[in-house]
Structures are given as C-alpha cells and as structure tokens.
Image (spheres, rainbow, N blue to C red):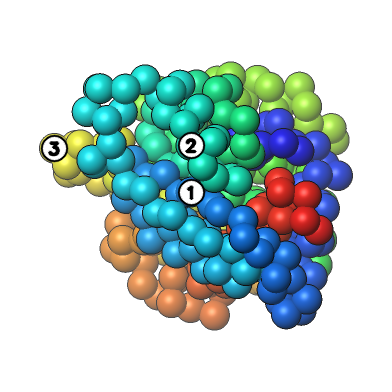
Amino acid sequence: MKNLISIKELNKKEILDLINLASKIKKSPNKFKDKLNRKVLLTFFALPSLRTELSFDTAMFRLGGEVIDYHSETSPWKKGKERIEDVAKVISRYCDIVMIRMNNHEQFLKFAKNSTIPVINGLTSYEHPCQILSDLLTIYEKKHKLTKLKLAYFGDANNNVTHSLIYACAILGINITVCCPNKKEFLPNKEVLNYSRKLAKKIEIIVADNIEKSAKNSDIIYTDSWMSYRIPKSQHNKRIKILKKFQVNKRLMGLAKKDAIFMHCLPALRGEEVTSEVIDSKKSVVFDQAENRLHMQKAILLKLLNKI
C-alpha cells in the first residue's frame, strides 16, 4: 500500500488491517503519539472541508508530526500558471506525505502519478476512500462484523461516497442496495457497478427505486447530501422535488431491522435527505462516524509511512 487512491485498489486484508490498526489506536492512542516525529504532512485543498481537514491535522499532531495546510486559491496551479504534474514534483521534494481534496479526479491521478511521496485521496468527484474506511470502522464497532449485513443507501447515488461504498461492500462481502431515482444524473457510475459485481462473491449489489423493498431487513441505512460540491445552486429546487421520496425519515427507518443504524458522512441538511427525528435519534451513529475519521486518518498515515 504505497498510496490511498481508491477503495477499488485495496484488497480485503488491507482494509481489515486498517480497521484493526485504527481500533488499536483508538483504544491506546499514547502508544502511537511519537510515531511520526519530524514527519511533514501537506494537506492540499481545492474544495471546502471540515472533517477531512481537522481530522488529518489533529491526527498528524497527535502522532508527533507537523502539518502544512495549503489551500489552492492562491496556487499558481489553480490560476492556470503551473501544471499539476510540476506541483506534485515540487511537493515531493519538501514533504513526506500529501493528502489532496479536489473535485477533478483526473487531475488528482496526474498528481499521484508524478509524486514520489505517498498520496492520499481526501475526496474527488469519483471517490471518498477515507470516509468509507472510517465508516467501516464504525460499522464494525456497532455490528461486530463486516459480513452477512445489508446496507441500504438512499438518495443521490451518483457521487463519491456511493462509489466508495459499493467498492467496499463488494470487497468485504456486504450486501448493498442503492435506492435512487431511475435517472442517469442520480444513478451510480456504471463502471463502478460492473467492476464491483464481477468482484463480489455471494452478495447482492442492487440498484432500485423501490423504497420499501430497499429498506426491508436492512442493518444499515445510509444517505448523503443531495447538493454536493459539484451541483450548482440553481439545481436545488429541481433536485429536492425529485429526491424527496428518498428522504430517510421515521417511516423509512421503521422498514429496516429493529437494531438498524443510521449513517451519514456529513454535512447534513435536516429536512432534506434526512429528518431531524432520525439523525438526532439513538439509531444515528453520525457523530461516531465523524470521530472515527480521526482514528482512521492516523491508521492511514502510519501505514503509508511504514511507521506501524
């Protein structure tokens, strides 16, 4: 594991190793407090962030390392004055590891190809591996297993979180149903589905628009924002109208198993993709998910820098 580019590029053992390491770090953080002494992490942001930025910053500090937060607004690359390939080569001469959060996945891949230090995908338009690895840690904590489960995702499925979820479920053996409007703009990427279905063994990867069937017997109900960074504000009202029936509310949660948990990667808009009575209920584990970003980021950093 030289980089963290995509869930797709990880195997089952690598995912489980990260979950086990994150669990150990969470239980005994002091054992790891000086592991990254004098190491420098550059966090490179071309998109807004709360959890990704703060969790990586805090993780690096608590592991004894240093962080440079670089926002691209003033970057020559952002202004079209420098190739991102050259940016990657320069950063590789200064820092030990880099985490990048940017919309353009192809640009991210160009950076990674030209970097000589480990590169972490902090979110692109295509995937969000750090989020999903943290979510898997949360699922394991709550369900004490990562097999023989059913995860049902509701809402806009043409996004990075859904794609990483599908890959992860295929690799680990979690049944997943993606419930979304049967319109191209809301459906998950076909390449993601085709690859995952070939990879999956003895599990179902279903895309449907039937709320009741999708939620029935689910162990995990998951949703995400209907207005991700790539969506213009002018599309808000149109999207709300189309997606409203896929809102996670008390009725929908009632269709799942009695001990089902509710997950959301945040930020959440109460009243849109989820109601307040669900996200603020005892079934909700959204803030456990947020906390686990910290522990998983530590595991990712240690793994990539060979400091376990």
Q: Amino acid at mark 2?
A: Ile
Q: Amino acid at mark 3?
A: Ser
> Measured from the top left, where is residue 6 in percent x and y?
62, 34
Q: Is residue 17 left or right of residue 108?
A: right
Instruction: Name the residue carrying label 3.
Output: 234
Q: What quarter of the picture does the N terminus occupy?
A: top right
| Front residue (pair 19, 233) | 19
> Measured from the top left, where is residue 76 in percent x and y?
27, 30
Query: Of the residues tagged 3 and 2, which is closer to the observer?
Result: 2
Measured Cα–Cα span from mark 1 to mark 2 = 8 Å
Label located before the other in sequence (1 or 3): 1
Q: What residue is at 67 percent from the left and 52 percent from the top?
A: 300
Q: Which labelled disc corresponds to residue 74?
A: none
Instruction: Name the residue carrying label 1.
Output: 42
Q: What residue is at 36 percent from the left and 72 percent from the top?
A: 276
Label located before the other in sequence (1 or 2): 1
| Front residue (pair 4, 233) | 4
Tag 2, which secondary structure?
A: helix
Label located before the other in sequence (3 or 2): 2
The crowding category of the residue bearing disc 2, from other C-alpha atoms within 10 Å (few below 14, some 14 to 19, many at least 20), is some
* Badge 1 vs badge 2, beta-carbon distance below 8 Å: yes
Tag 3, which secondary structure?
A: helix
Instruction: Name the residue carrying label 2.
Output: 91
